[in-house]
Amino acid sequence: MSGRFQQYVQRYWGFIVLLAWGGAILGLGLVRFSSYHVDETSARALLLTWSLVQQVATPIPLAQLPDLRTLLLLPLAIYWPGSLVAAKVFSILLAFAAAALIYRWSKQTTSREVALIAAALLLICPLTVQQIDAVGAAPFLLLAFGLGPGLERRYRAGQRLVSGWYFSLILLATFAVSLHPAGLAYPLALAWSWYKSPIAPRQKPLYIGLVAGPLFILLFQGGWVSPHWLANPVSPLASVFSGTPTAMGQSSTLAGFLMLFLLIGLFVLDHAFLTRDFMGRLLLLAVLVGLSAADDTWGLTALVVILFRGMHYLVLVNEKLNRPGLLGERGIVLACLFVLATAFMVGDKTYAQVIRTHTLSPQDKLIQDTAKIAKVEEKLKGQQVRIASQWPGRTMLACKCYVLPLPPPAPDNEAFIKQIHGIDYIVFDHKDRANKDLVREIAKAGGALETVAIKSAGVILQVRKMLAPGKAGNGGKPNSKSGAPQPR
């Protein structure tokens, strides 16, 4: 009986770990089910899919089309429209699938011991939990990277140059590129692999599809949504231990510098393997290319390199000491595992405390204040408020009202006044360099706008009533079929 039970455990141990880990994430309160702390692109994707399923109009595409996360989130909208709970549970499943695929790669290239330790640390990392809570791009991107080597091997094993596996590679490359600048690593790794080890004598046509797919999606969706260009890479690496978003500024700078030095040291020490192995090339290019937009998604990708390759060298160093006993053979590894696991669990505990106390980031506080103002005005006016926001997806989730993107640059002040005609409030970060033209137009508008609140993350401006459409048409009241299903 014990042998049969052991066989069942060995066969289904992945599902057992998934249930235990996913249950702990949900049971310990490490994700919030409110309308805040959701990634902007994910918020837009959810609102777009909810609107498509329930056949209602939404202004989200006017801001910028979300990335290809929308395709994966569409089945959720069909069965659970308006549910943030379903989206975050789905994010848990994707994060575990990505960790399992990277674990399989590490087990094949190093050892099961290294793969198991690194995968376990990755799953309990506070930054992983934070990305799950935000339905961020990191789980989706790591899943694409985890699927990459297997698809490439299957394509090489095929006998046709242009086959279904080839188009699967192009689709996966397009998906990865749409998520984050680090996703460019996948088509670059494929091109590198095909150049170093040619598949056929004439393979130039293969590169056409490899370039056309990602280029088309970038042009179609208008680039990436609000990338952190040339950001400080220390902040996302420091948030590995705290799980708090980099915008909250609560991470340790010293920990970030330590992680950065480890990453550079691994690249120098392990460059031979990283340039030889397909997954190694993929991670190397992802870190280097993604450095141009270093955010939490980039930080989690860099952590994968540090954990899975760093743990491999830590085991080798411990074995070279050649000392008897468990502490002699694995003392350094166990000490490092204890320190990292303790630091990660403390970070998870802190993150859970942040959720319990309803602590929000500065941007979320600004959006929350906007939602409160909109709710009060809706009660007074008896009609839905229209808002122009720098974060239309997150603002619409919180306000549950009609939200438009910020008005584009206007040639003169009169044109700007016409653009904001019918808008009740404008919410944006006045310190963002991308909004300098908007700030200038608002300054020229004079009495047309009134400052309601000034926060560290931005300002809330009210458009004066003289700009309202009055009794024209339907009195400025938006169509009842506009908007999106309310999250529940």
Image: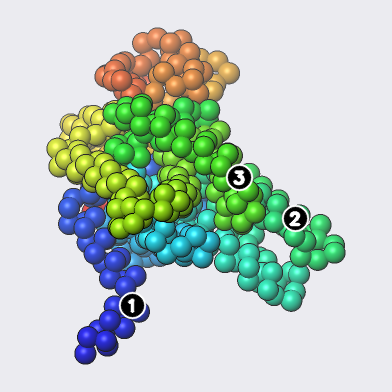
User: How does the figure colour the protein chain or chains?
Assistant: rainbow
Which residue is denoted by mark 3 in the rendering?
271
Indicate whether 76 appears above or below 347.
Answer: below
As helix, strand or loop, the secondary structure at mark 3 comes to helix
**Cα distance, mark 3 to mark 1?**
35 Å
Indicate whether 95 appears above or below 259.
Answer: below
Is 266 placed left or right of 257 in the picture?
right
Mark 3 vs mark 1: which is more N-terminal?
A: 1
Q: Amino acid at mark 1?
A: Gln
Mark 3 vs mark 2: which is more N-terminal?
A: 2
Q: Amino acid at mark 2?
A: Lys
Which corner quadrant of the image does residue 477 belong to?
top left
Residue 113 lies, in percent from the top left, at 39, 61
Which residue is denoted by mark 1 in the rendering?
10
**Residue at (49% x, 20% y) in the render:** 433
Residue 197 lies, in percent from the top left, at 75, 60
Q: Amino acid at mark 3?
A: His
Residue 296 lies, in percent from the top left, at 41, 39
Which residue is denoted by mark 2 in the rendering?
196
